[in-house]
Image: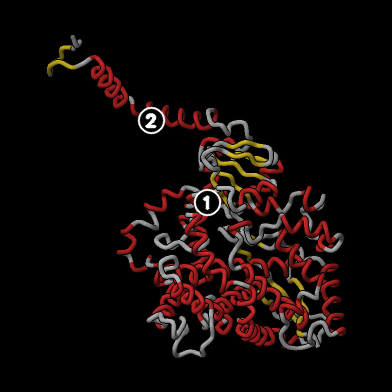
Amino acid sequence: MAVTLETDNGTISPTRAVLSGVGTLLLSYWLVTLPVLFVSRLLYKRYASPLRKYPGPWLASCSRLWKVLSTASTHTHHDHIALHKKYGPVVRIAPDEVSVASPEAARVLLSAGKRFYKTGFYGVFPPPENPDIFTEVREDVHAQKKKVANVPYGMAAMQQLSPFINDTIEVLIRKLDGLASGNQGMNDFSKGPVVDLGNWLHWFAFDVLGEVAFSRSFGFLEEGRDVDNAIKTIDDSQRYNGIVGQVPFLDHFLRRNPLRKLIPALNTKNALITRMALEELGRRKPFDKESEGKWRGGDGRQDLLASLIKGHLKDPERFSEGDVFAVAHGAIFAGSDSTASTMQSFFWQVLADKRVYAALTDEFDTAVKEGRIPPTGNISWNEAQTLPYFQSCLKEAMRVRPAVGLNITRLVPPEGAELDGHFFPGGVTIAANGWVLHRDRAVFGSDADVYRPERWLEDPEEAKRMERYMFQFGGGSHLCIGRNLALLEINKVIPRLLRDYRFELVHPGRELQAHATFFVVQEGLEVYIAKKM
């Protein structure tokens, strides 16, 4: 026989009576209840988590707020270096996330077949409805897209586009000649105009990508400015991606909110890069095997977009028209800031050390005398490979100041996994930061914090070992697809500049400003410049 209680409104069960009483009590004392529940949840995350044994900031153990604040500061790369120096090789940076400092652990994390899949962080990057190779989190789909895109991004295909990189270099040289004309042949050119070399390198990187991807320049070099605020738009987008990517569900209330479409100013199709990509797709339609994606009114060159359209025509089911747009569009977003940042790092590191700059200058002078590189005109990829000290300076710049400042993140597979002697349960997020990994003393030496190009020349076997643990382009099955293009343009433009000009930092004692949104955006590379005789 069921037990009931009499009330003014009839009879109810004791269980319902208790729940009703508790509910009434909670409503009556909500000012106390909510904080108690909140604090209880925080304490549970901190002390009941399987990650509780790993040290880290107190706030990080019970909230993702530490990561949000660190990312918003744009100094998260420095924050992670400091964390690992203070706490050790494994640091808890969120309730369900740890950062690892071991390069070997990072290699496992990025290896094919290990089933460490991308986190929700990558889903925040646009376009969400048609992810590109970087943002695609489905491993099988990622592999399909990369298989198609690998062909046009191969070094052989990229070298066929060298003439268009050369054309852009000539525009840059013409502009720099104008800025350096008053200093030609001078031994002391510090009285000349101040040149923001970082800006010119950034504009160069954009214009090269326009030529390579769409057979048309964006016009940054010719105008000597950020056309249509395209660079600022990308930097703002990367800043949003980095911050909101720490709490991905917020994206559904912000950028993915359908109400945004009602506000024209927030329409991303108005951005220069997106607009140009859509225009190029439009004027190459209809896609057919006769045109192979080339612009019918153009010069017939096989640019990146044409190669991607060709891949789409071969397998439209696996590589859709949307994939063509996403990969071409993503090439501009990913390739511009990252390549510019690498070149800016190179020049700042080299010019900040007079010994290194003198040795580099000697190598170029000797190479010209020996006929390894031409005395005038552009320098080829193969010719640049005959400059060992230049190559070591470039590698060292990518080691000390990698272009990506935020963490790469992966999920531990459901059954759990061991990394560098630590077992992590399934679902935990593992993070690794290139600025931390590249300072591992066991791999790079006791002076790993120091820019010293000679480390790459001292022992060939040791250099190969260090190369295994370089993550400036990611690693494993997720090695950056634009790596060949970035290295090609860097190996063509920097040697040309070093051979033809002399540079001097305006503020030699001042650190280059570096802000990590996703890529490391750098400011303040101001130089005096003189044309060599």
Vertically, is 191 above or below 116?
A: below
The quarter holding residue 24 reads top left
Position in image of residue 68 (x %, y %): 52, 48
Residue hosting label 1? 118
Which of the two residues, 458 or 171, is positioned nearer the viewer here?
458
Q: In the rendering, at what x and y percent does residue 135 appear?
A: 49, 59
The image's colour scheme reads secondary structure
Q: Residue furthest front?
A: 314
Where is residue 488, by image quadrant? bottom right
The answer to whether residue 163 is left or right of residue 254 is: right
Task: Name the residue rendered at 69%, 65% in the picture.
Answer: 345
418 or 245, which lies in front? 418
Q: Which comes before the other along the chain, label 1 or label 2? A: 2
| Secondary structure at numbered mark 1 | strand
Task: Confirm or deny contact between disc 1 and disc 2 (CB under 8 A).
Answer: no
Quadrant occupied by the N terminus = top left
Up/down of 425 relative to 243, above or below: above
Asked which secondary structure carries label 2, the reply is helix
Residue positioned 58% across, 81% down in the render = 221
Residue at (70, 80) in percent of width and height: 193
Question: At which x and y percent is residue 97?
Answer: 56, 41
**For the C terminus, which image quadrant?**
bottom right
Q: What amino acid type should be assigned to the residue bearing mark 1?
A: Lys
The foreground one among 39 and 287 is 287
Give me the residue at 60% from left, 81% from top: 161
Mark 2 Cα-neighbour bin, 10 Å: few <14, some 14–19, many ≥20: few
Foreground label between 1 and 2: 1
Q: Is residue 137 visible?
A: yes
Give the number of the disc on residue 34: 2
Q: Mark 1 to mark 2: distance in Å?
A: 34 Å
Give percent across and percent down for residue 213: 53, 77
